[in-house]
C-alpha cells in the first residue's frame, strides 16, 4: 500500500465522525438560504440545485462501492481497508456527538476566523491526498504509454549501520506525482478562493474514499451504526441548535454545495443548497457492504446493492421534499436509515436469504481464504 493510500485509509474514521457531525441534509444551510436570504430561488434554479446534489451524492456511493469490492479481494493484509466492528459502531454516535459539541464550544469561545484557518490547512492536506487517491486509477488508464511511469522513493533516516531507522519512506511513481500536482492545484484554489467547485471536488473525493476504505464487517454492525446515528441525527437537529450553528460557522469541504442562483449569476452564484458528506458516507458504506454480500453469493446478481441504492435515492428525495416544504433543517438519516435498511431486509425475507444476509461476515471470508492458501502451501510441501 502506498503512503498516500495509508494516509487515506487511516484518515476516514476521524473524518467520518467529523463529517457525520455535520450531516443534516441541505437545510443546515437552507434555513439561512430560504428564510433569511433576500434572494428567492426560481423553480428552475431550485430543481437544478437539488437534482445536482442528488446526482453528486450517487456518484461516490456507486463508484466507491465498486472500488470497495476490489479492496476486499486484496490478498495483502496491508492493503485492506479500515474495518468497523460492532463495538466501533456502538461508540460512533458518542464520538460524533462529542466532536460536534466540542466544535460548537470552540466556535463560541475562540475566533471563528482562526479556527477556520486551521481547518483549511488541515483539510488542504487531506483533500490533496484524497483527490490524488481518487484520480490515480483514472489517470493510470489514460496515461500515455510513450511516457515511462518511473518509480521514485523519498527516504529520510536517522542513525547509522544497524541503528539506522526510517523516518520517512515514501514510494511513488510518475502517475502518483501527476495526481498530487493536479490535486495540489485544486487545493490552492480552494484555500485562496473557497470556490464551490473546488469544495465539491474535495467533498466528492472524501465521500468516495470513505465509502471505499471504510468497511463494515457484517450487516448487524451496519444496523447498529445506522440505528445509533439515526437517533443522533434526530436529537442534534430537532433537539438543539448545535448542529445548525456549527454547520453555518464551519468552513471546510465537509459538504457538497450547489448554487440555486446559477442560472442568474453563473459560476459566481452564492445562494447555495447543500448536502452533508455524512449523509453520503454513512449510508454509502452500508450499501457497499451489500454489494460485497451480493458478490459473495456468486449468483451473478446485484439485487441487494440495487435495492439499497434505489432506497437511498427515494430516501434522499423524500428528505429534500420535506425540507423544501417545511423550510426547516431535516436530519437526513431520519429518512435514509429506514429506507436503506428496510428495503434490502424486505427483499431478503422475500428471497428467503434473511439468515444468510445476517450471517455474512467479511472477516470469516478472509480467514477461509487464508486457510485455503495455507492448505495449498502444505500440499505443495508434501
Image (cartoon, rainbow, N blue to C red):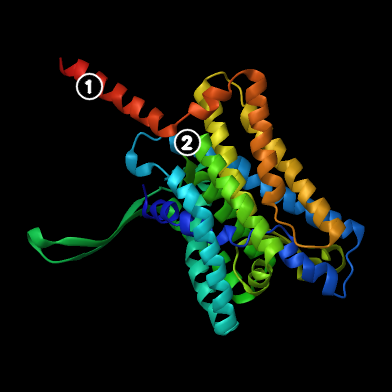
Q: Could you say which quadrant of the image residue 157 lies in? A: bottom left
Residue 225 visible within the image: yes
Q: Image point 39% across, 42% down: which residue? A: 80
Residue 4 on image: x %, y %: 41, 55
Residue 143 on image: x %, y %: 50, 46
Q: Image point 57% across, 59% down: which residue? A: 19
Q: Image point 52% across, 36% down: which residue? A: 220
Q: Are marks 2 and 1 in contact (CB under 8 Å)?
A: no
Write down the residue under mark 1. Answer: 377
Quarter occupied by the C terminus: top left
From the viewer's perspective, is 299 left or right of 240? left
- Tag 2 secondary structure: helix
Residue 179 visible within the image: no
Where is 154 relative to 315, above or below?
Answer: below
Crowd tier of the residue under label 1, counting other residues whose Cα lies within 10 Å: few below 14, some 14–19, many 20 or above: few
- Tag 1 secondary structure: helix
Total labels: the figure holds 2
Instruction: State the mark number for residue 70.
Output: 2
Where is 36 relative to 96, above or below?
Answer: below
Q: Image point 8% across, 60% down: which residue? A: 161
- Name the residue nearer the viewer: 233 or 146: 233
Question: Could you give the CA–CA distance between mark 2 and mark 1, rounded to whole angstroms?
Answer: 24 Å
Disc nearer the start of the sequence (2/1): 2
Residue 233 on image: x %, y %: 64, 56
Q: Could you say which quadrant of the image residue 154 lies in? A: bottom left
Amino acid at each position: 500500500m502506498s503512503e498516500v493510500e495509508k494516509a487515506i485509509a487511516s484518515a476516514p474514521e476521524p473524518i467520518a465522525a467529523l463529517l457525520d457531525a455535520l450531516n443534516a441534509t441541505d437545510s443546515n444551510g437552507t434555513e439561512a438560504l430560504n428564510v433569511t436570504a433576500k434572494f428567492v430561488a426560481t423553480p428552475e434554479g431550485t430543481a437544478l440545485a437539488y437534482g445536482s446534489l442528488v446526482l453528486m451524492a450517487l456518484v461516490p456511493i456507486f463508484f466507491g462501492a465498486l472500488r470497495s469490492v476490489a479492496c476486499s479481494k486484496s490478498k495483502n493484509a496491508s492493503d485492506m481497508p479500515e474495518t468497523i466492528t460492532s463495538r466501533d459502531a456502538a461508540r460512533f454516535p458518542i464520538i460524533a456527538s462529542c466532536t460536534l459539541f466540542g466544535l460548537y464550544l470552540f466556535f463560541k469561545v475562540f475566533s471563528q476566523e482562526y479556527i477556520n484557518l486551521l481547518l483549511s490547512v488541515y483539510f488542504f492536506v487531506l483533500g490533496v491526498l484524497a483527490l490524488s487517491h481518487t484520480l490515480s486509477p483514472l489517470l493510470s488508464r489514460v496515461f500515455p504509454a510513450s511516457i515511462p511511469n518511473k518509480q521514485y522513493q523519498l527516504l529520510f533516516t536517522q542513525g547509522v549501520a544497524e541503528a539506522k531507522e526510517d523516518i520517512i519512506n515514501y514510494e511513488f511513481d510518475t502517475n502518483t506525482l501527476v495526481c498530487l500536482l493536479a490535486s495540489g492545484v485544486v487545493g490552492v484554489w480552494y484555500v485562496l478562493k473557497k470556490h464551490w467547485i473546488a469544495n465539491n471536488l474535495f467533498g466528492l473525493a472524501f465521500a468516495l474514499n470513505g465509502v471505499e476504505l471504510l468497511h463494515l464487517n457484517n450487516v448487524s454492525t451496519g444496523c447498529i451504526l445506522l440505528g445509533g446515528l439515526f437517533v443522533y441525527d434526530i436529537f442534534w437537529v430537532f433537539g438543539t441548535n448545535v448542529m445548525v450553528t456549527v454547520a453555518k460557522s464551519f468552513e471546510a469541504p465537509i459538504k457538497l454545495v450547489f448554487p440555486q442562483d446559477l442560472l442568474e449569476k453563473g459560476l459566481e452564484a452564492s445562494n447555495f443548497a447543500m448536502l452533508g458528506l455524512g449523509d453520503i458516507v454513512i449510508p454509502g458504506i452500508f450499501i457497499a457492504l451489500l454489494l460485497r454480500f451480493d458478490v459473495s453469493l456468486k449468483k451473478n446478481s446485484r439485487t441487494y446493492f440495487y435495492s439499497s441504492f434505489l432506497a437511498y435515492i427515494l430516501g434522499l428525495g423524500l428528505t429534500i421534499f420535506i425540507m423544501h416544504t417545511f423550510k426547516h433543517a431535516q436530519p437526513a438519516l431520519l429518512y435514509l436509515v429506514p429506507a436503506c435498511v428496510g428495503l434490502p431486509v424486505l427483499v431478503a425475507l422475500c428471497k428467503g436469504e434473511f439468515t444468510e444476509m445476517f450471517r455474512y461476515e467479511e472477516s470469516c471470508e478472509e480467514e477461509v481464504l487464508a486457510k485455503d492458501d495455507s492448505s495449498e502451501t502444505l500440499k505443495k510441501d508434501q
